[in-house]
Amino acid sequence: MSALRALFRRELSLAWGRGGGPLFACAFYGGFATLLPLASGPEPQRLATVAPGAAFAALALSSLLSLERLFERDFEDGALDLLALGAPLEATSAIKCLTQWIATGAPLALLAPVVAIALGAEPRLAGLTFLTALAAGIGFAFVGGVGASLALGAKRGGVLVAVIVLPLFVPPVIFGAGAVDALAGGLDWKPGLFLLLAYVLAAAGLSPFAMAAACRNAMG
Amino acid sequence: MRPFGFAGAQAWDWPRWDRRMISRLALDDLALIRGERRLFAGLTFSVGRGEAIALTGANGAGKTSLLRAIAGLLKPATGTVVFEGENGALDPDDARGQGLHLLGHHDGLKPARTAREELDFWSRWMGGDDDGVAKAIEAFELSALLPLDVRRLSAGQRRRLVLARLVAAPRPLWLLDEPMAPLDAARRARFGALMADHIAGGGLIVAAVHDPLPLPARTVSLDEVTA
């Protein structure tokens, strides 16, 4: 148990620094949110109708940024060998994704309501936007981890991760943005949230096995 | 006399290694294939308590791959790797997870983290405690290096930081890949003494080397089994 705790601390400290860490992801997210109004013309209402959806799509893209390095560095420098020796790779992968969520997903979720409001969403949607972004972040981290582990050993792994993972990011974007849209339109927002949570649960439950298998494949 | 001035007898105390103790490692008719190339075939040898194996072979003969296969990171094409305890065969996952150290060229150290962070993490990951880490720091004279980022360490300093795990987390079977190469003469001698200590305490060593080990060791040459 103390080994897994030590791993958690290590992964967290690595995640803060990985690919620029949360700052880079947040800066990308903020930059995207600034570009969108500039690109969509002078009428703010036009953007306001798609604000939650745009905020979610940008969130998914920002979550991709540091995924590439999730396993790759450990794979290249031999750390993954030693990690595989000490504990089941399933547990190690899960901890990696969890720390990725804490270091990148959570800061992005904090930024999500700000971005949504900046794009023209009503401030009363901020709470649900944060909540759905936080939940979706878990899904992004775990499903993204599967992409990162599958891309191990490939040249241009980063591009491959994006291609593998983006289609799998579709459901949380639909459910999350859908829940916020429903609340904005005065409809029942709970189904969207529950579907999102179901996705997150399935992702967190299943992907560690896929990640472990992909890592073993890359190492053997 | 203990070469490192710490209570070695305590560190290598047999019972601390408990029932998952490896008392014999046996390889039977092992063949390894990497990609299209067969590295070797028909490799059979065993190591018992208190024995050291010097694994020799030309560059690319498969020494590193063999160590990784013993550690379970590569699947052999044919043949078996068996870990035996006092009471017969051990569960291979348990034996590997708790009973062996694998130290290779790829040391898994992160350049941006401090030596202290890396030593702490890997020692704990291998099952060591504060006590063990303190002993390791003393044995490998690491205290001055601890606050430095790993990227600032020389090759020899880096290697000492890696070897320190052997002391920080006592485990019976050491799989070493060119352990001495970057060390200076004095440290080679001291590490040689540490290995001799481990052997005397009932440990097992399989070391891939080009120079002879500074302790009595059986030589297994991969050149002779290369297919």
Image (spheres, rainbow, N blue to C red):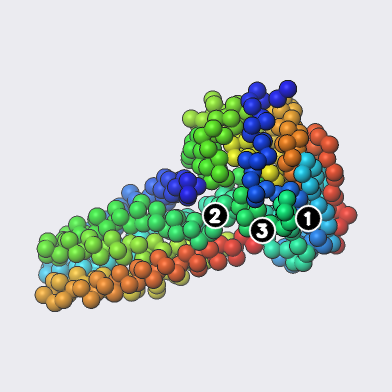
Q: Is residue A180 visible?
A: yes
Per the image, the residue denoted by label 1 is B26
- Marks 2/3: CA–CA distance: 13 Å
Where's the C terminus of chain A, which quadrant?
bottom right
Q: Which residue is at a point 82% across and 47% down the rendered structure image?
A: B56
What is the three-letter code of the residue carrying label 3? Pro
Question: Label 2: chain?
Answer: A
- Pointer 2 and pointer 1: residues touching (CB < 8 Å)? no
Q: Is residue A188 left or right of residue B127?
A: left
B198 or A121, nearer to the observer: B198
Question: Label 3: chain?
Answer: B
A190 or A61, nearer to the observer: A190
Per the image, the residue denoted by label 3 is B92
Per the image, the residue denoted by label 2 is A87
**Would you identify the image quadrant in which residue B77 lies?**
bottom right
Mark 3 or mark 1: name the one nearer the start of the chain.
1
Helix, strand or loop under label 1? strand
Q: Is residue B82 left or right of residue A99?
A: right
Query: Could you classify mark 2 by the number of other residues whose Cα lies within 10 Å: few (under 14), some (14-19), or many (20 or more)?
Result: some
Q: Which residue is at a point 54% across and 58% down the rendered structure image?
A: A88
